[in-house]
Amino acid sequence: MQILTTAAALHAYTETARRAGQRVGLVPTMGALHDGHLQLVQAARAQCNVVVASIFVNPTQFNNAEDFRLYPRVPEADAALLAPAGCTALFTPSVEEMYPRPTVLRFDFGDLERVMEGAHRPGHFNGVATVVSKLFHMARPHQAFFGQKDWQQVAIIRQLVADLSFDLEIVTCPTIREADGLAMSSRNCRLDAPARAVAPLLHQVLEAAAAQVRQGVPPAQVKAAADATLAAEPLLTPEYVEVADAETLQPLDVYAPGRAVVLCLAAHLGGVRLIDNVVVE
Amino acid sequence: MQILTTAAALHAYTETARRAGQRVGLVPTMGALHDGHLQLVQAARAQCNVVVASIFVNPTQFNNAEDFRLYPRVPEADAALLAPAGCTALFTPSVEEMYPRPTVLRFDFGDLERVMEGAHRPGHFNGVATVVSKLFHMARPHQAFFGQKDWQQVAIIRQLVADLSFDLEIVTCPTIREADGLAMSSRNCRLDAPARAVAPLLHQVLEAAAAQVRQGVPPAQVKAAADATLAAEPLLTPEYVEVADAETLQPLDVYAPGRAVVLCLAAHLGGVRLIDNVVVE
Protein backbone atom coordinates (compact mmCIF):
# COMPACT_ATOMS: atom_id res chain seq x y z
CA MET A 1 0.00 0.00 0.00
CA GLN A 2 1.37 3.37 -1.01
CA ILE A 3 1.18 6.35 1.34
CA LEU A 4 0.46 9.62 -0.50
CA THR A 5 0.38 13.02 1.15
CA THR A 6 0.04 15.47 -1.73
CA ALA A 7 -2.69 16.12 -4.26
CA ALA A 8 -0.10 15.88 -7.03
CA ALA A 9 1.02 12.42 -5.92
CA LEU A 10 -2.57 11.20 -5.60
CA HIS A 11 -3.43 12.58 -8.99
CA ALA A 12 -0.43 10.93 -10.62
CA TYR A 13 -1.30 7.63 -8.94
CA THR A 14 -4.91 7.49 -10.17
CA GLU A 15 -4.09 8.96 -13.59
CA THR A 16 -1.59 6.17 -14.15
CA ALA A 17 -4.20 3.61 -13.13
CA ARG A 18 -6.78 5.16 -15.46
CA ARG A 19 -4.40 5.21 -18.38
CA ALA A 20 -3.82 1.51 -17.82
CA GLY A 21 -7.58 0.99 -18.07
CA GLN A 22 -8.01 0.25 -14.36
CA ARG A 23 -11.03 1.22 -12.28
CA VAL A 24 -10.42 3.53 -9.33
CA GLY A 25 -12.42 3.36 -6.09
CA LEU A 26 -12.32 6.07 -3.40
CA VAL A 27 -13.21 5.66 0.28
CA PRO A 28 -13.13 9.07 1.99
CA THR A 29 -12.76 8.81 5.79
CA MET A 30 -11.73 10.88 8.79
CA GLY A 31 -9.72 7.96 10.20
CA ALA A 32 -10.12 6.15 13.54
CA LEU A 33 -11.22 3.29 11.33
CA HIS A 34 -13.69 0.62 12.39
CA ASP A 35 -15.36 -2.30 10.62
CA GLY A 36 -17.78 0.07 8.89
CA HIS A 37 -14.90 1.76 7.11
CA LEU A 38 -13.19 -1.54 6.31
CA GLN A 39 -16.39 -2.83 4.77
CA LEU A 40 -16.32 0.20 2.44
CA VAL A 41 -12.75 -0.63 1.46
CA GLN A 42 -13.67 -4.26 0.82
CA ALA A 43 -16.67 -3.22 -1.28
CA ALA A 44 -14.42 -0.89 -3.27
CA ARG A 45 -11.84 -3.62 -3.83
CA ALA A 46 -14.52 -6.00 -5.06
CA GLN A 47 -15.43 -3.54 -7.83
CA CYS A 48 -12.21 -1.63 -8.56
CA ASN A 49 -8.59 -2.47 -9.38
CA VAL A 50 -7.22 0.36 -7.32
CA VAL A 51 -8.64 1.54 -3.98
CA VAL A 52 -7.70 4.89 -2.49
CA ALA A 53 -8.70 5.49 1.13
CA SER A 54 -8.32 9.04 2.38
CA ILE A 55 -7.87 9.97 6.01
CA PHE A 56 -8.44 13.65 6.64
CA VAL A 57 -10.13 15.18 9.67
CA ASN A 58 -11.71 18.01 7.72
CA PRO A 59 -11.83 21.18 9.83
CA THR A 60 -14.44 22.90 7.65
CA GLN A 61 -17.16 20.36 8.45
CA PHE A 62 -16.86 20.72 12.23
CA ASN A 63 -19.18 23.37 13.59
CA ASN A 64 -17.86 22.60 17.10
CA ALA A 65 -14.16 23.30 17.75
CA GLU A 66 -14.09 20.93 20.75
CA ASP A 67 -15.51 18.09 18.65
CA PHE A 68 -12.76 18.73 16.09
CA ARG A 69 -10.08 18.79 18.79
CA LEU A 70 -11.30 15.59 20.42
CA TYR A 71 -11.92 13.68 17.19
CA PRO A 72 -9.81 10.49 17.52
CA ARG A 73 -6.60 10.39 15.46
CA VAL A 74 -4.73 7.05 15.28
CA PRO A 75 -2.88 7.16 11.95
CA GLU A 76 -0.55 4.16 12.52
CA ALA A 77 -3.37 1.86 13.63
CA ASP A 78 -5.47 3.00 10.66
CA ALA A 79 -2.69 2.32 8.16
CA ALA A 80 -2.22 -1.17 9.58
CA LEU A 81 -5.91 -1.98 9.02
CA LEU A 82 -6.21 -0.68 5.47
CA ALA A 83 -3.80 -2.84 3.47
CA PRO A 84 -5.32 -6.17 4.59
CA ALA A 85 -8.79 -4.84 3.66
CA GLY A 86 -7.67 -4.23 0.07
CA CYS A 87 -6.60 -0.58 0.10
CA THR A 88 -3.85 0.06 -2.46
CA ALA A 89 -3.12 3.70 -1.58
CA LEU A 90 -3.66 5.76 1.55
CA PHE A 91 -4.04 9.52 1.07
CA THR A 92 -3.25 11.50 4.23
CA PRO A 93 -2.95 15.18 3.29
CA SER A 94 -2.26 18.02 5.71
CA VAL A 95 -4.79 20.80 6.24
CA GLU A 96 -2.46 23.10 4.27
CA GLU A 97 -2.43 20.64 1.35
CA MET A 98 -6.23 20.52 1.20
CA TYR A 99 -6.77 24.22 1.95
CA PRO A 100 -3.77 26.22 0.71
CA ARG A 101 -6.02 29.31 0.85
CA PRO A 102 -9.24 30.02 2.75
CA THR A 103 -12.31 28.89 0.82
CA VAL A 104 -14.65 31.63 -0.42
CA LEU A 105 -17.31 29.54 -2.16
CA ARG A 106 -20.25 28.31 -0.08
CA PHE A 107 -22.70 25.57 -1.05
CA ASP A 108 -26.40 25.70 -0.24
CA PHE A 109 -28.43 22.52 -0.71
CA GLY A 110 -31.78 24.10 0.14
CA ASP A 111 -34.39 21.98 1.94
CA LEU A 112 -32.04 19.01 1.91
CA GLU A 113 -29.85 20.72 4.51
CA ARG A 114 -32.52 22.62 6.44
CA VAL A 115 -33.32 19.49 8.47
CA MET A 116 -31.57 17.17 10.92
CA GLU A 117 -27.75 17.37 10.72
CA GLY A 118 -27.88 20.42 8.48
CA ALA A 119 -30.19 22.26 10.87
CA HIS A 120 -28.20 21.30 13.98
CA ARG A 121 -24.70 21.70 12.58
CA PRO A 122 -24.52 25.02 10.71
CA GLY A 123 -21.97 24.89 7.90
CA HIS A 124 -21.44 21.14 8.26
CA PHE A 125 -22.63 20.15 4.80
CA ASN A 126 -20.84 23.04 3.14
CA GLY A 127 -17.64 21.62 4.61
CA VAL A 128 -18.56 18.10 3.54
CA ALA A 129 -19.42 19.12 -0.03
CA THR A 130 -16.23 21.16 -0.30
CA VAL A 131 -13.85 18.44 0.89
CA VAL A 132 -15.64 15.72 -1.07
CA SER A 133 -15.44 17.83 -4.25
CA LYS A 134 -11.72 18.30 -3.66
CA LEU A 135 -11.16 14.59 -3.06
CA PHE A 136 -13.16 13.72 -6.18
CA HIS A 137 -11.03 16.09 -8.24
CA MET A 138 -7.77 14.82 -6.76
CA ALA A 139 -8.53 11.10 -6.94
CA ARG A 140 -10.96 11.14 -9.87
CA PRO A 141 -12.53 7.81 -8.93
CA HIS A 142 -14.96 5.75 -11.00
CA GLN A 143 -16.80 4.97 -7.77
CA ALA A 144 -16.84 6.50 -4.29
CA PHE A 145 -18.05 4.58 -1.26
CA PHE A 146 -19.98 5.97 1.72
CA GLY A 147 -21.73 4.45 4.72
CA GLN A 148 -25.48 4.54 5.22
CA LYS A 149 -24.95 5.70 8.81
CA ASP A 150 -24.50 9.21 7.42
CA TRP A 151 -27.75 9.06 5.46
CA GLN A 152 -28.17 12.80 5.04
CA GLN A 153 -24.52 13.19 4.03
CA VAL A 154 -25.01 10.60 1.31
CA ALA A 155 -28.13 12.44 0.10
CA ILE A 156 -26.15 15.70 -0.07
CA ILE A 157 -23.28 14.06 -1.94
CA ARG A 158 -25.65 12.40 -4.41
CA GLN A 159 -27.20 15.82 -5.06
CA LEU A 160 -23.74 17.36 -5.49
CA VAL A 161 -22.75 14.68 -8.00
CA ALA A 162 -25.99 15.03 -9.96
CA ASP A 163 -26.09 18.84 -9.96
CA LEU A 164 -22.46 19.29 -11.04
CA SER A 165 -22.40 16.22 -13.35
CA PHE A 166 -19.45 14.60 -11.60
CA ASP A 167 -18.44 11.63 -13.72
CA LEU A 168 -18.54 8.95 -11.01
CA GLU A 169 -20.90 6.64 -9.16
CA ILE A 170 -21.79 6.90 -5.47
CA VAL A 171 -22.08 3.53 -3.71
CA THR A 172 -23.76 3.35 -0.30
CA CYS A 173 -22.95 0.46 2.07
CA PRO A 174 -25.10 -0.65 5.03
CA THR A 175 -24.41 0.54 8.57
CA ILE A 176 -22.23 -1.92 10.50
CA ARG A 177 -23.28 -2.44 14.11
CA GLU A 178 -21.83 -3.84 17.31
CA ALA A 179 -23.42 -7.05 18.61
CA ASP A 180 -25.77 -4.98 20.78
CA GLY A 181 -26.94 -2.86 17.84
CA LEU A 182 -24.86 0.29 18.41
CA ALA A 183 -23.88 1.74 15.04
CA MET A 184 -20.12 1.71 14.64
CA SER A 185 -18.65 5.19 14.83
CA SER A 186 -15.20 6.65 15.32
CA ARG A 187 -16.68 8.63 18.20
CA ASN A 188 -17.75 5.47 20.11
CA CYS A 189 -14.27 5.11 21.64
CA ARG A 190 -14.93 8.34 23.53
CA LEU A 191 -17.90 6.80 25.40
CA ASP A 192 -17.18 5.87 29.03
CA ALA A 193 -18.59 2.63 30.46
CA PRO A 194 -21.95 4.00 31.69
CA ALA A 195 -22.53 5.85 28.39
CA ARG A 196 -21.51 2.81 26.36
CA ALA A 197 -24.03 0.71 28.32
CA VAL A 198 -26.83 3.12 27.43
CA ALA A 199 -25.79 3.67 23.79
CA PRO A 200 -27.63 0.65 22.25
CA LEU A 201 -30.88 2.36 23.24
CA LEU A 202 -30.52 4.57 20.15
CA HIS A 203 -30.82 1.65 17.77
CA GLN A 204 -33.54 0.03 19.89
CA VAL A 205 -35.61 3.20 19.63
CA LEU A 206 -35.13 3.27 15.86
CA GLU A 207 -36.10 -0.39 15.47
CA ALA A 208 -39.22 0.11 17.60
CA ALA A 209 -40.11 3.14 15.49
CA ALA A 210 -39.51 1.18 12.27
CA ALA A 211 -41.88 -1.52 13.46
CA GLN A 212 -44.52 1.14 14.08
CA VAL A 213 -43.97 2.65 10.62
CA ARG A 214 -44.45 -0.79 9.06
CA GLN A 215 -47.74 -1.05 10.99
CA GLY A 216 -48.90 2.31 9.66
CA VAL A 217 -48.74 4.22 12.96
CA PRO A 218 -48.86 7.93 12.00
CA PRO A 219 -45.47 9.75 11.89
CA ALA A 220 -46.29 12.16 14.73
CA GLN A 221 -47.17 9.25 17.00
CA VAL A 222 -44.00 7.34 16.05
CA LYS A 223 -41.88 10.41 16.76
CA ALA A 224 -43.63 11.07 20.10
CA ALA A 225 -43.03 7.51 21.27
CA ALA A 226 -39.34 7.67 20.32
CA ASP A 227 -38.94 11.08 21.98
CA ALA A 228 -40.52 9.73 25.18
CA THR A 229 -38.25 6.67 25.33
CA LEU A 230 -35.12 8.79 24.83
CA ALA A 231 -36.27 11.41 27.35
CA ALA A 232 -36.68 8.69 30.00
CA GLU A 233 -32.95 7.89 29.93
CA PRO A 234 -31.16 10.41 32.18
CA LEU A 235 -27.71 9.94 30.59
CA LEU A 236 -29.07 10.87 27.14
CA THR A 237 -29.78 14.33 25.76
CA PRO A 238 -31.72 13.83 22.54
CA GLU A 239 -31.16 16.40 19.79
CA TYR A 240 -33.75 15.27 17.26
CA VAL A 241 -35.82 12.30 16.14
CA GLU A 242 -37.29 12.53 12.64
CA VAL A 243 -39.65 10.43 10.57
CA ALA A 244 -38.77 11.61 7.07
CA ASP A 245 -39.02 10.80 3.39
CA ALA A 246 -35.91 8.72 2.68
CA GLU A 247 -35.06 10.67 -0.48
CA THR A 248 -36.11 14.27 0.17
CA LEU A 249 -35.37 14.00 3.95
CA GLN A 250 -38.39 16.20 4.67
CA PRO A 251 -40.38 15.31 7.81
CA LEU A 252 -43.58 13.40 7.08
CA ASP A 253 -47.08 14.26 8.20
CA VAL A 254 -48.46 11.19 6.45
CA TYR A 255 -46.89 8.28 4.59
CA ALA A 256 -46.80 8.46 0.79
CA PRO A 257 -47.53 5.14 -0.94
CA GLY A 258 -44.46 3.49 -2.45
CA ARG A 259 -41.93 5.88 -0.89
CA ALA A 260 -39.26 4.73 1.56
CA VAL A 261 -39.15 6.28 5.03
CA VAL A 262 -36.01 7.05 7.02
CA LEU A 263 -35.96 7.27 10.80
CA CYS A 264 -33.09 9.42 12.00
CA LEU A 265 -31.90 10.58 15.39
CA ALA A 266 -29.07 12.44 17.06
CA ALA A 267 -28.31 12.48 20.78
CA HIS A 268 -25.61 13.54 23.19
CA LEU A 269 -24.35 10.84 25.54
CA GLY A 270 -21.51 11.36 28.01
CA GLY A 271 -20.18 14.36 26.07
CA VAL A 272 -20.29 12.54 22.72
CA ARG A 273 -22.74 13.29 19.93
CA LEU A 274 -24.04 10.17 18.16
CA ILE A 275 -26.32 9.71 15.15
CA ASP A 276 -28.08 6.70 13.70
CA ASN A 277 -30.84 5.84 11.22
CA VAL A 278 -32.97 3.00 9.93
CA VAL A 279 -34.66 2.92 6.54
CA VAL A 280 -38.10 1.38 6.04
CA GLU A 281 -38.59 0.49 2.38
CA MET B 1 -14.27 18.39 -36.51
CA GLN B 2 -16.56 16.06 -34.61
CA ILE B 3 -20.01 17.18 -33.48
CA LEU B 4 -20.94 15.77 -30.06
CA THR B 5 -24.32 16.25 -28.41
CA THR B 6 -24.18 14.03 -25.32
CA ALA B 7 -22.09 14.11 -22.15
CA ALA B 8 -21.23 10.45 -22.71
CA ALA B 9 -19.88 11.13 -26.21
CA LEU B 10 -17.86 14.12 -25.00
CA HIS B 11 -16.46 12.17 -22.11
CA ALA B 12 -15.44 9.27 -24.35
CA TYR B 13 -13.80 11.71 -26.76
CA THR B 14 -11.62 13.45 -24.18
CA GLU B 15 -10.90 10.24 -22.23
CA THR B 16 -9.52 8.67 -25.40
CA ALA B 17 -7.36 11.74 -25.97
CA ARG B 18 -6.09 11.67 -22.39
CA ARG B 19 -5.26 7.98 -22.56
CA ALA B 20 -3.19 8.74 -25.65
CA GLY B 21 -1.27 11.32 -23.63
CA GLN B 22 -2.83 14.29 -25.44
CA ARG B 23 -3.64 17.63 -23.85
CA VAL B 24 -7.28 18.73 -23.89
CA GLY B 25 -8.37 22.37 -24.17
CA LEU B 26 -11.93 23.56 -23.53
CA VAL B 27 -13.53 26.77 -24.83
CA PRO B 28 -17.00 27.17 -23.29
CA THR B 29 -19.23 29.53 -25.30
CA MET B 30 -22.88 30.41 -25.79
CA GLY B 31 -22.43 30.55 -29.57
CA ALA B 32 -23.00 33.46 -31.98
CA LEU B 33 -19.25 33.34 -32.31
CA HIS B 34 -17.08 36.34 -33.08
CA ASP B 35 -13.34 36.93 -33.31
CA GLY B 36 -13.06 36.99 -29.52
CA HIS B 37 -14.25 33.38 -29.35
CA LEU B 38 -12.09 32.33 -32.27
CA GLN B 39 -9.05 33.80 -30.57
CA LEU B 40 -9.81 31.56 -27.57
CA VAL B 41 -9.97 28.53 -29.87
CA GLN B 42 -6.68 29.50 -31.50
CA ALA B 43 -5.03 29.98 -28.10
CA ALA B 44 -6.32 26.56 -27.04
CA ARG B 45 -5.03 24.93 -30.20
CA ALA B 46 -1.61 26.47 -29.68
CA GLN B 47 -1.33 24.73 -26.30
CA CYS B 48 -3.43 21.57 -26.64
CA ASN B 49 -3.69 18.63 -29.04
CA VAL B 50 -7.44 18.47 -28.81
CA VAL B 51 -9.76 21.49 -28.57
CA VAL B 52 -13.37 21.16 -27.49
CA ALA B 53 -15.61 24.19 -28.04
CA SER B 54 -19.01 24.03 -26.38
CA ILE B 55 -22.01 26.00 -27.56
CA PHE B 56 -24.76 26.07 -24.98
CA VAL B 57 -27.05 29.00 -24.22
CA ASN B 58 -27.29 28.22 -20.52
CA PRO B 59 -30.76 29.08 -19.19
CA THR B 60 -29.69 29.09 -15.52
CA GLN B 61 -27.36 32.08 -15.94
CA PHE B 62 -30.00 34.37 -17.49
CA ASN B 63 -31.82 36.40 -14.88
CA ASN B 64 -33.89 37.99 -17.68
CA ALA B 65 -36.16 35.68 -19.71
CA GLU B 66 -36.31 38.13 -22.62
CA ASP B 67 -32.52 38.30 -22.82
CA PHE B 68 -32.44 34.48 -22.95
CA ARG B 69 -35.11 34.40 -25.68
CA LEU B 70 -33.38 37.04 -27.80
CA TYR B 71 -29.85 35.66 -27.35
CA PRO B 72 -28.58 35.05 -30.92
CA ARG B 73 -28.46 31.41 -32.04
CA VAL B 74 -26.69 30.64 -35.34
CA PRO B 75 -25.44 27.05 -34.98
CA GLU B 76 -24.56 26.42 -38.65
CA ALA B 77 -22.55 29.63 -38.99
CA ASP B 78 -20.78 28.88 -35.69
CA ALA B 79 -19.82 25.36 -36.75
CA ALA B 80 -18.38 26.70 -40.01
CA LEU B 81 -16.10 29.10 -38.11
CA LEU B 82 -14.78 26.63 -35.53
CA ALA B 83 -12.94 24.03 -37.59
CA PRO B 84 -10.69 26.54 -39.42
CA ALA B 85 -9.79 28.09 -36.04
CA GLY B 86 -8.48 24.74 -34.78
CA CYS B 87 -11.47 23.26 -32.96
CA THR B 88 -11.41 19.45 -33.10
CA ALA B 89 -14.79 18.77 -31.45
CA LEU B 90 -17.92 20.86 -31.05
CA PHE B 91 -20.15 20.03 -28.07
CA THR B 92 -23.75 21.21 -28.55
CA PRO B 93 -25.89 19.62 -25.84
CA SER B 94 -29.61 20.17 -25.35
CA VAL B 95 -30.94 21.75 -22.17
CA GLU B 96 -32.24 18.30 -21.17
CA GLU B 97 -28.77 16.80 -21.63
CA MET B 98 -27.18 19.42 -19.37
CA TYR B 99 -30.04 19.56 -16.84
CA PRO B 100 -31.81 16.18 -16.76
CA ARG B 101 -33.25 17.22 -13.38
CA PRO B 102 -33.70 20.64 -11.77
CA THR B 103 -30.61 21.74 -9.87
CA VAL B 104 -30.92 21.99 -6.07
CA LEU B 105 -27.40 23.12 -5.16
CA ARG B 106 -26.68 26.87 -5.10
CA PHE B 107 -23.25 28.51 -5.06
CA ASP B 108 -22.45 31.64 -3.10
CA PHE B 109 -19.16 33.42 -3.82
CA GLY B 110 -19.54 36.01 -1.11
CA ASP B 111 -18.17 39.51 -1.73
CA LEU B 112 -16.93 38.44 -5.16
CA GLU B 113 -20.52 38.31 -6.41
CA ARG B 114 -22.02 41.11 -4.32
CA VAL B 115 -20.75 43.70 -6.83
CA MET B 116 -21.22 44.60 -10.50
CA GLU B 117 -22.66 41.72 -12.58
CA GLY B 118 -23.44 39.68 -9.48
CA ALA B 119 -25.31 42.55 -7.86
CA HIS B 120 -27.24 43.45 -11.02
CA ARG B 121 -27.98 39.94 -12.28
CA PRO B 122 -29.26 37.87 -9.32
CA GLY B 123 -28.43 34.19 -9.75
CA HIS B 124 -26.21 34.82 -12.77
CA PHE B 125 -22.98 33.52 -11.27
CA ASN B 126 -24.68 30.55 -9.67
CA GLY B 127 -25.76 29.56 -13.18
CA VAL B 128 -22.29 30.22 -14.56
CA ALA B 129 -20.55 28.19 -11.84
CA THR B 130 -23.02 25.33 -12.27
CA VAL B 131 -22.69 25.02 -16.03
CA VAL B 132 -18.93 25.52 -15.98
CA SER B 133 -18.57 22.78 -13.32
CA LYS B 134 -20.65 20.45 -15.50
CA LEU B 135 -18.59 21.24 -18.60
CA PHE B 136 -15.35 20.72 -16.68
CA HIS B 137 -16.57 17.32 -15.48
CA MET B 138 -17.79 16.29 -18.91
CA ALA B 139 -14.76 17.47 -20.91
CA ARG B 140 -12.11 17.18 -18.19
CA PRO B 141 -9.74 19.61 -19.89
CA HIS B 142 -6.15 20.34 -18.94
CA GLN B 143 -6.85 24.00 -19.74
CA ALA B 144 -10.01 26.06 -20.14
CA PHE B 145 -10.04 29.38 -22.00
CA PHE B 146 -12.09 32.46 -21.16
CA GLY B 147 -12.18 36.04 -22.40
CA GLN B 148 -11.16 39.01 -20.32
CA LYS B 149 -14.33 40.84 -21.37
CA ASP B 150 -16.13 38.85 -18.66
CA TRP B 151 -13.64 39.86 -15.98
CA GLN B 152 -15.86 39.10 -13.01
CA GLN B 153 -16.89 35.76 -14.52
CA VAL B 154 -13.24 34.79 -14.82
CA ALA B 155 -12.65 35.80 -11.19
CA ILE B 156 -15.60 33.63 -10.10
CA ILE B 157 -14.38 30.66 -12.15
CA ARG B 158 -10.84 30.99 -10.80
CA GLN B 159 -12.29 30.96 -7.27
CA LEU B 160 -14.41 27.91 -8.13
CA VAL B 161 -11.37 26.06 -9.48
CA ALA B 162 -9.23 26.95 -6.46
CA ASP B 163 -11.87 26.24 -3.83
CA LEU B 164 -12.89 22.85 -5.23
CA SER B 165 -9.37 21.88 -6.37
CA PHE B 166 -10.36 21.30 -9.99
CA ASP B 167 -7.37 19.76 -11.73
CA LEU B 168 -7.08 22.22 -14.61
CA GLU B 169 -5.68 25.61 -15.55
CA ILE B 170 -7.76 28.69 -16.39
CA VAL B 171 -6.32 30.77 -19.24
CA THR B 172 -7.62 34.30 -19.80
CA CYS B 173 -7.30 35.93 -23.25
CA PRO B 174 -7.50 39.69 -23.97
CA THR B 175 -10.73 41.36 -25.07
CA ILE B 176 -10.97 41.61 -28.86
CA ARG B 177 -12.38 44.92 -30.11
CA GLU B 178 -13.87 46.35 -33.29
CA ALA B 179 -11.78 49.02 -35.06
CA ASP B 180 -13.69 51.73 -33.17
CA GLY B 181 -12.98 50.12 -29.80
CA LEU B 182 -16.32 48.39 -29.15
CA ALA B 183 -15.67 45.12 -27.32
CA MET B 184 -16.81 42.19 -29.44
CA SER B 185 -19.94 40.57 -28.03
CA SER B 186 -22.54 38.17 -29.35
CA ARG B 187 -25.13 40.75 -28.34
CA ASN B 188 -23.64 43.47 -30.63
CA CYS B 189 -25.60 42.12 -33.62
CA ARG B 190 -28.78 43.20 -31.83
CA LEU B 191 -27.71 46.89 -31.87
CA ASP B 192 -29.51 49.04 -34.47
CA ALA B 193 -27.56 51.67 -36.44
CA PRO B 194 -28.00 54.60 -34.00
CA ALA B 195 -27.13 52.37 -31.00
CA ARG B 196 -24.14 50.91 -32.81
CA ALA B 197 -22.89 54.44 -33.54
CA VAL B 198 -23.00 55.33 -29.84
CA ALA B 199 -21.59 52.01 -28.56
CA PRO B 200 -17.85 52.87 -28.85
CA LEU B 201 -18.45 55.49 -26.15
CA LEU B 202 -18.28 52.69 -23.57
CA HIS B 203 -14.68 51.90 -24.36
CA GLN B 204 -13.81 55.59 -24.73
CA VAL B 205 -15.12 56.22 -21.22
CA LEU B 206 -13.06 53.32 -19.87
CA GLU B 207 -9.89 54.49 -21.60
CA ALA B 208 -10.36 58.02 -20.29
CA ALA B 209 -10.89 56.61 -16.80
CA ALA B 210 -7.80 54.40 -17.14
CA ALA B 211 -5.74 57.45 -18.05
CA GLN B 212 -7.01 59.19 -14.91
CA VAL B 213 -6.19 56.13 -12.76
CA ARG B 214 -2.65 56.15 -14.13
CA GLN B 215 -2.41 59.84 -13.16
CA GLY B 216 -3.56 59.04 -9.62
CA VAL B 217 -6.94 60.78 -9.83
CA PRO B 218 -8.95 59.47 -6.81
CA PRO B 219 -11.40 56.62 -7.58
CA ALA B 220 -14.52 58.62 -6.65
CA GLN B 221 -13.51 61.38 -9.06
CA VAL B 222 -12.76 58.88 -11.86
CA LYS B 223 -16.14 57.25 -11.35
CA ALA B 224 -17.97 60.60 -11.26
CA ALA B 225 -16.38 61.69 -14.54
CA ALA B 226 -17.30 58.41 -16.25
CA ASP B 227 -20.84 58.55 -14.87
CA ALA B 228 -21.24 62.10 -16.18
CA THR B 229 -20.01 61.22 -19.68
CA LEU B 230 -22.37 58.26 -19.94
CA ALA B 231 -25.32 60.24 -18.53
CA ALA B 232 -24.83 62.87 -21.24
CA GLU B 233 -25.61 60.36 -24.00
CA PRO B 234 -29.41 60.12 -24.33
CA LEU B 235 -29.40 56.69 -26.04
CA LEU B 236 -27.47 55.12 -23.14
CA THR B 237 -28.83 53.98 -19.78
CA PRO B 238 -25.80 53.26 -17.59
CA GLU B 239 -26.17 50.49 -15.01
CA TYR B 240 -22.89 50.83 -13.16
CA VAL B 241 -19.36 52.13 -13.45
CA GLU B 242 -16.87 50.76 -10.92
CA VAL B 243 -13.25 51.46 -10.05
CA ALA B 244 -12.31 48.23 -8.30
CA ASP B 245 -9.43 46.08 -7.15
CA ALA B 246 -8.69 43.82 -10.12
CA GLU B 247 -8.48 40.69 -7.97
CA THR B 248 -11.03 41.13 -5.17
CA LEU B 249 -13.38 43.22 -7.39
CA GLN B 250 -14.25 45.38 -4.41
CA PRO B 251 -14.78 49.11 -5.14
CA LEU B 252 -11.81 51.27 -4.20
CA ASP B 253 -11.79 54.33 -1.98
CA VAL B 254 -8.04 54.75 -2.51
CA TYR B 255 -5.45 52.97 -4.63
CA ALA B 256 -3.32 50.31 -2.95
CA PRO B 257 0.34 50.34 -4.03
CA GLY B 258 1.26 47.48 -6.36
CA ARG B 259 -2.29 46.24 -6.92
CA ALA B 260 -3.95 46.26 -10.35
CA VAL B 261 -7.18 48.21 -10.83
CA VAL B 262 -10.09 47.16 -13.04
CA LEU B 263 -12.53 49.66 -14.52
CA CYS B 264 -15.84 47.99 -15.30
CA LEU B 265 -19.15 49.21 -16.66
CA ALA B 266 -22.52 47.96 -17.81
CA ALA B 267 -25.06 49.94 -19.81
CA HIS B 268 -28.28 49.45 -21.75
CA LEU B 269 -28.24 50.71 -25.32
CA GLY B 270 -31.16 50.26 -27.72
CA GLY B 271 -32.61 47.39 -25.68
CA VAL B 272 -29.26 45.58 -25.42
CA ARG B 273 -27.19 45.26 -22.26
CA LEU B 274 -23.45 45.62 -22.84
CA ILE B 275 -20.47 45.28 -20.50
CA ASP B 276 -16.80 46.15 -20.86
CA ASN B 277 -13.70 46.61 -18.74
CA VAL B 278 -10.11 47.81 -18.84
CA VAL B 279 -7.38 46.75 -16.44
CA VAL B 280 -4.72 49.15 -15.20
CA GLU B 281 -1.69 47.20 -13.96
Image (tube, coloured by chain):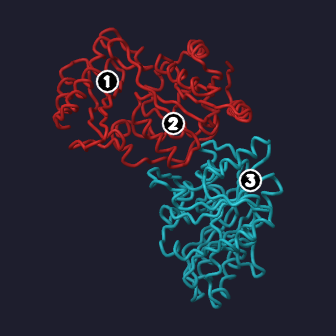
Chain colours: A cyan, B red
Label 2 SS: strand
Disc marking residue B125: none
Tag nearer the camera, 3 or 1: 3
Instruction: Give the image location of residue B77, x and y in percent.
Output: 56, 12
The amino acid pointed to by label 1 is His
- As measured in the structure, the alpha-carbon distance from the residue carrying label 2 to the one carrying label 1 is 30 Å
Label 3 SS: strand
- N-terminal of the pair, mark 2 or mark 1, is 2
Tag nearer the camera, 2 or 3: 2
Task: Answer few, some or many: residues within 10 Å of disc 1's Cα (few below 14, many 20 plus, some between 14 and 19).
Answer: some
In contact (CB < 8 Å): disc 2 and disc 1:
no
Which of the 4 image quarters holds residue A219? bottom right
Please state, as top left, top right, bottom left or bottom right, where the N terminus of chain A lies in the image.
bottom right
Instruction: Give the image location of residue A279, x and y in percent.
Output: 71, 65
Q: Nearer the viewer, residue A66 or B67?
A: A66
Is the residue B117 above or below the residue A22 in the image? Answer: above
Which of the 4 image quarters holds residue A230? bottom right
The amino acid pointed to by label 2 is Ile
Chain for numbered disc 2: B
Task: Answer few, some or many: residues within 10 Å of disc 2's Cα (few below 14, many 20 plus, some between 14 and 19).
Answer: some
For disc 3, the marked residue is: A25
For disc 2, the marked residue is: B170
Q: Quick one: which residue is furthest to the bottom in this view? A: A194
Asked if badges 3 and 1 are on one and the same chain, I answer no
| Residue at 70%, 74% in the rendered image | A77
A180 left or right, relative to A68: right
